[in-house]
Image (spheres, helix red, strand yellow):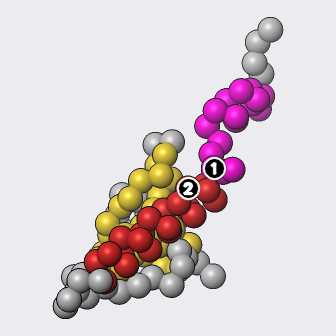
Amino acid sequence: MGISAGHVRADLIARYNKDDAWSGRRDAFERVSNHVESLIGARDGAAVIPAAGMRPVTVLQGPLHDQIGLLGALRSHERVLVLLHLLGAEQRVVLARGAIEAIE
């Protein structure tokens, strides 16, 4: 039995569609980020910019243009940490603050 144009194998969808796991991974990433933030913030003189929840963002420029991810944390020197789904897994990517835009 062959595969015709437009045919999608169910086993491929189950293997590569990670939408169901995204929520759990986002929650785990947020819990770890909050814990690390509290540890760093506990030190004297540490400057931590808390991110109010993980907001969805889109990348505006560069090789990751039009990728959608979650804003993980604000970093120093106009940089941000974004969680993107790339190559079948969530990847932490540091980008320039001007390279992303919040999705409403």
From the image, give the main secondary structure of the stretch colored magenta.
Answer: helix
Which disc, if any, is residue 21? 1
Residue 74: name its quadrant: bottom left
User: Is residue 66 at all visible to an observer of this figure?
Assistant: no
Residue at the image position 28 percent from the left and 77 percent from the top:
40
Q: Do callouts 2 and 1 mark residues in contact (Cβ within 8 Å)?
A: yes
At x 29%, y 83%, the residue is 42
For label 2, count other residues whose C-alpha is less than 10 Å away and answer few (under 14), some (14-19) or many (20+). few
The location of residue 98, given as percent across then percent down, is 35, 81
Vertical arrangement, residue 37 with respect to residue 89, above or below: below
Q: Nearer the viewer, residue 99 or 30?
A: 30
Residue type highlighted by circle 1:
Ala
Magenta span covers which residues? 6-21
Numbered badge on residue 25: 2
Q: Residue furthest bottom?
A: 45
Q: Is residue 99 above or below residue 20?
A: below
- Which one is nearer the viewer's eye here, 51 or 101? 51
x, y percentage for residue 57?
A: 52, 73
| Foreground of the two, 104 or 22 | 22
Using residue 55 as the reference point, say whether residue 42 is left or right of it: left
CA gap, disc 2 to disc 1?
6 Å
> The residue under label 2 is which amino acid type?
Arg
Residue placed furthest toward the top = 1
Coordinates of residue 9 in the picture (x, y in percent): 74, 26
Secondary structure under tag 1 reads helix
Tally of numbered discs: 2
**Residue appearing at x 44%, y 74% in the figure:** 34
| Residue 46 image point, x, y percent | 22, 86
